Amino acid sequence: MKVVWFIALVMVAIATLLFLAGQLGILKGTPPTDLGVKDGRLKPPARTPNSVNSQAGLYPDHPQAQYAAIAPLAYQGDAKAAMAKLVDVVQSLPGTVIVSQSDGYVYAQSTTKLLRFTDDVEFWLDTSNQVIQVRSASRIGRKDFGVNRQRIEVIRAQLNAS
């Protein structure tokens, strides 16, 4: 019985420390300095299973190319209107702020409410293919438990809803 109480006490202590670390910003991570579009490409997927990238196929030998693969966001009609709609959708996501944007590129950061983990999310208007390329990646941690994929799919659904 004492062992069970000890294990429970240790688990509560770990959970409390993890929560405090998140609230103090320790789990936020450092913003990457190499984001953006270079030679028509977003940054490659992360080396661990914690990102998605619609251009993962451009990196066939990458160890996470298959895990990271996600379809780009399709749009019809005016590209500027599609990007404006994307900005509206991204701004409506809880914990998400747009850090920078230009005519064909949007960079946002999405932070979880409880532990304050921050993910970097990029969108690039690929007019030659009439899609918006996407990349969403966790800054820290080995796995993302599907959070980045889910975020992009929520955005896709909201863009297609109207």
Image: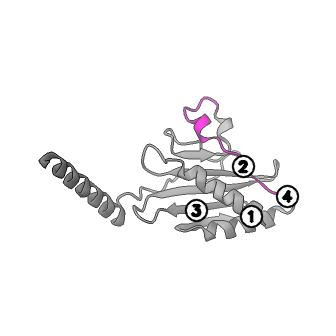
Q: Which residue is mark 2?
A: 72
Q: Main secondary structure of the magenta part?
A: loop
Residue drawn at 55 percent across, 46 percent down: 51
Q: Is residue 101 visible?
A: yes
Residue drawn at 49 percent across, 47 percent down: 145
Q: What's under tag 4, amino acid-wise?
A: Gln
Label drawn at residue 83: 1
Label drawn at residue 33: none
* SS class, disc 4: loop
Residue drawn at 41 percent across, 56 percent down: 29
Q: What is the total number of numbered labels drawn onto the structure image? A: 4
Q: How far is disc 1 from disc 3 in space, using C-alphas?
A: 13 Å
Residue drawn at 85 percent across, 58 percent down: 76
Q: What's under tag 1, amino acid-wise?
A: Met
Q: What's under tag 2, amino acid-wise?
A: Pro
Q: How far is disc 1 from disc 2 in space, using C-alphas?
A: 13 Å
Label drawn at residue 108: 3
Q: Mark 4 or mark 3, which has the lower sequence index?
A: 4
Q: Which residue is mark 4?
A: 76
- Crowding around mark 1 (Cα neighbors within 10 Å: few <14, some 14 to 19, many 20+) is many
- In this view, the residue in front, 128 or 68, is 68
Q: Position of residue 10 (x, y in %)?
A: 21, 52
Q: Is residue 23 above or below residue 50?
A: below
Magenta region, residue range:
60-75
